[in-house]
Image (cartoon, helix red, strand yellow):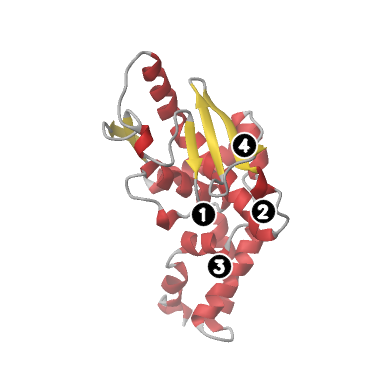
Amino acid sequence: MSAGPNAAGPFYRRLFIPEANLERICSEALASVDLLPETPGPVRIERFIYLHFSIEEEYEAMPDHIMGCAKFTRQGLRRIIVNRQLAEQDDPVSKVRVRSTLAHEAGHGLFHAGLFVEKLSLEAEGHLFGNAAAFNSVTGEGFVCRAEADIERVPHFEWWEYQANSAMAALLLPKHLIIQAARARLPMVLAGAGSFDSRVREAEREIAAVFNVSRRMVSIRLGKWWVEQAHQPSLF
């Protein structure tokens, strides 16, 4: 990771995280508390938050458009909160959204705690910089998730949200495990019934069920992997 000046933003520095580094840090964080699965399966994200950050997720009433938030003090991440109304909806889609929200906020905890500690410490000393009020996702004490986390729909200037979404995907779908799950379904995708796109969608639905995430997250995470595999000469 590296950082540079960020005078126009809500933090003193802007953080740059190469994708490979982000993947490695997320996998190492899971492994450090024995929560990196050996085979494809759901990551116990609530347990990860408890063991890695020494806090438990909380559930509070929030406006409908807010899914959750992460709150910091000068000692680091102190609270991860999920919209209680979302958590109380007893359907598979809502349960998946709770998991993605928890992983998103955990991503903020992994990568942005230092930025918030620095911000709060400097403000306590009377130093002001940037304009947090100009960013919907940043408050005076943390981050607010205002819509379902979606890697493709984050404004380019809210780099911290893009990083938290990338961490969300890396935590819930460790790269080597999702590739393993996809390879197991590759023969069906290449030679099954129906169109290629329909076979991809079915495979992604199956993978989403294995990891207890949304199919959209699986699709974004795999990207062009299916097409690249289909064009490998050795597979024909």
Vertical order, 58 against 44 (above or below): above
Q: Check contact, mark 1 vs mark 4: CB within 8 A.
A: no
Q: Check contact, mark 3 vs mark 2: CB within 8 A.
A: no
Could you tell me residue 167's position as x and y percent? 49, 46
Which residue is labeled 1 in the image? 175
Q: Crowdedness of circle 2 by 10 Å Cα count: few (<14), some, many (20+)?
A: some
Q: Residue at x 62, y 45 (%)?
A: 36
Which residue is labeled 4 in the image? 49
In what quadrant of the picture does the N terminus appear? top left
Vertical order, 69 against 74 (above or below): below
Which residue is labeled 3 in the image? 183
Could you tell me residue 202's position as x and y percent? 59, 74
Q: Earlier in the sequence, mark 3 or mark 1?
A: 1
Residue type at mark 4? Ile
Could you tell me residue 153's position as x and y percent? 41, 56
Q: Residue at x 53, y 31 (%)?
A: 71
Which label sits on residue 95? 2
Residue 110 shows up from this direction: no
Q: Earlier in the sequence, mark 2 or mark 4?
A: 4
